[in-house]
Image (tube, rainbow, N blue to C red):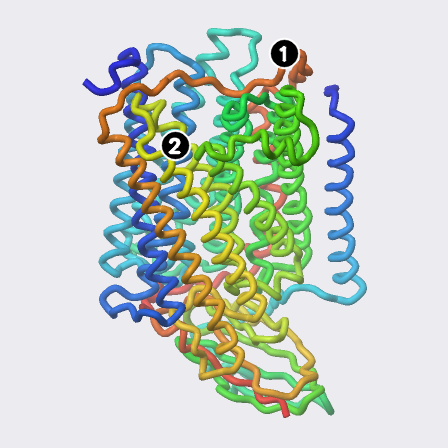
Amino acid sequence: MMLSSAPPQVRSENRVVIAHIYTATTAIVLGALFGLLQGYSRADAIQTPPWFDYYRILTLHGVLMALVFTTFFITGLSLFVTYRSIPRERSLRLGWLGWAVMVLGTAMAAVTILSGNATVLYTFYAPLKAAPTFYLGATLLVIGTWIVAIEIFENVAYFRKAHPGEPVPLVVFCAAVTFLMWWIATLGVVAEMGLLIPWAFGWTHGINVMFTRLFFWYFGHPLVYFWIMGAYIIWYNIIPTRYGGNLFSDGLTRLTFLMLLLLSTPVGLHHEFMEPGIAPQWKMLHTLTTYGVAVPSFITAFAIFASFELAARAKGKSGFAATVANLPWRDPAFAGAAYGMLLFIIGGFGGLINASYSMDSLVHNTIWIVGHFHVTVGGPVALTFVGCAYWMIPKLTGRTLWKPEWALWQTRIWFLGMLIMSIAMHVAGLLGSPRRTESVAYLGSAAAASWEPYMLLAAAGGTLLFISIIMFATVAIGTLVTNDKTADMTVTFATQPPAGEPTPAPLQHIFRWGVLAIVLAVLAYLGPVSELLQHPGYLAPGMRTW
Amino acid sequence: MRMHVHRYERWWMTFGFSMLVLFLCIIFFAAFADNMNPPSGLQQIDPTRVAQTPPFDHPGLRRLSDGKYEVYYVAQIFSFNPQTVTIPAGSTVTFYATSPDVVHGFSIVDTDVNMMVIPGWVNAASHTFRRPGTYLLLCNEYCGIGHANMAAKIEVQ
């Protein structure tokens, strides 16, 4: 019997987590294949056939990568850290139910997209109208994550009852805050589905386009922070253990997550700067709040580099070169996260540019934006997740990693591929190349011709990323089927040094901060929503233009 | 609540925070002093009656005075109407656009004209064309299978 080195309870918990993580792995492999086809199509290297057109592939790529891979990885990771930090005899019904509902929703949406009945991209802007099974599938995916959230919250409640007066373990605190933020954010997409589903079934004849967009972006930006918080869980709690370091500060880590909880939602209008129907002052308000949500990332940058330096000093090394040399660059889990951090420097500053109100007109809906979110969700987020999988899979299966040198090269190839692809996209975007188009010939225009070399570079970077993801999947699956069961399955998470500052009590609360987060979200959207309600809302009939 | 924050961390946070405040000051200065705001058209239109609603019943160029023009565009799957407009170099042009069907984008390459065109609304943006040449107007929001073909030209002479 596999997994024999762990007690039965842990083995059953591991199976839940393995289900989540390997579903994420399946999604990233399929998503990568579709991404490769897109890159080649944009570079005019291939022409997609009418029965499997570019936009269908684009919808699949976006949904699988942005919604399915990230979500399954974060649910798996969060359940893992919760189960391991709060050991107890527990029922795994919710963990499995959440997974099953998420898989069912994903399958419904994926089949609908594959059949060509939901070529609406992952932003599903109305009045483009997909088949109802697409919207139902997406809703089920979200509801599945709510079930996982309940499982995590229940464990927090259990811990508090069993250990009165003790702070919730940091890593569980981070996971719970992440899911609280996610729950507040997903209310937006569920509200949008409340408009879309009856309309898709034909029960209502028109849809208020402005509200669907507002609801989508109420959800769409915190979605990004959901990914980032997933990566931060790993950077703060797991990565320091890879170089024998400590957490810089327990209190600052909790503060970072609480700030992300409060500030992730009231920012969505920065995706709608170029829209009619929303007055400039609301756009300016969201510029301000988006700048605010950069602050926890500044804290994180400091905390991580401080932890690197303290680890080096503890070994008597000092100076920049010695600090860098002290880090375990040959450990794939560390390398994935570290290369991700480097990519986040580009991503973070690009994000500030996008959030800069009128300056967004230079980059809005150009391929710069695509470069930006690939160097963020495909950089600090996905590369950290993939690296973390190399650490987590042995802890889950008891099997040592198969081909660790492949894993290491995988992170390096990814870093290089992402650098090439995202820089090419950023530059082409500044030259005016739009996102989300099948080809960029555009009436033979000279401007369009100037984008061509960058499309080739992006395709080359994309090829490296595809190779890298195949290498990841090979290692992940190889580890499952090889028989070497000697891995150490015990898990420890980073803590601050014993001499560290005690965490102030207000930073140990979770749910009462959620109330404030909801208040801030309401305040941020009160203005634009009440103005839209005063306008006669045009109710658009659904259209199928693909 | 009191928490000790390391001195270096305080310096770093002061640096980061000051940088954000500086950027915001520049954005707000540009907005209030130079009127640099994103396109935010608040005028509404019945999308089912675009072809009957002036001025969109006759889309195209209107000369306001020397060097001042407006162009009214109907963006619909998968073309812009008008397809070509010609203006003298140095002209300031305000572009108005609306859609009778789905959401489109309106982006003029090599300019900062970039806006969303949403059925039910008229969006607007201005630009002064100093350099002569052929400018490419394209739809930069996915609107359907012919999206990549949705483009038009602005000739600046």
**Residue drawn 23% across the image and 29% down it:** A482
10 Å crowding of disc 2: few (<14), some (14-19), many (20+): many
Real-space CA distance between mark 2 and mark 1, rounded to the nearest whole angstrom: 29 Å
* Image quadrant containing the N terminus of chain A: top left
Q: Chain of mark 1?
A: A
Q: Amino acid at mark 2?
A: Tyr
Disc ID at residue A390: 2
Is the same chain shared between marks 2 and 1? Answer: yes
Element class at badge 2: helix
Position of B55 with respect to B104 (left or right) is right
Q: Chain of mark 2?
A: A
Considering only vertical position in the picture, is B156 above or below A435? below
Disc ID at residue A176: none
* Image quadrant containing the C terminus of chain A: bottom left
Position of A61 with respect to B105 (left or right) is left
Element class at badge 1: loop
Considering only vertical position in the picture, is B56 above or below A298? below
Disc ID at residue A498: 1
**Residue drawn 39% across the image and 19% down it:** A83
Q: Position of residue A377 (x, y in %)?
A: 48, 46
**Residue drawn 28% across the image and 31% down it:** A479
Q: Position of residue A164 (x, y in %)?
A: 53, 7
Q: Position of residue B74 (x, y in %)?
A: 49, 79
Q: Can residue A393 be seen in the rendering of this structure?
A: yes
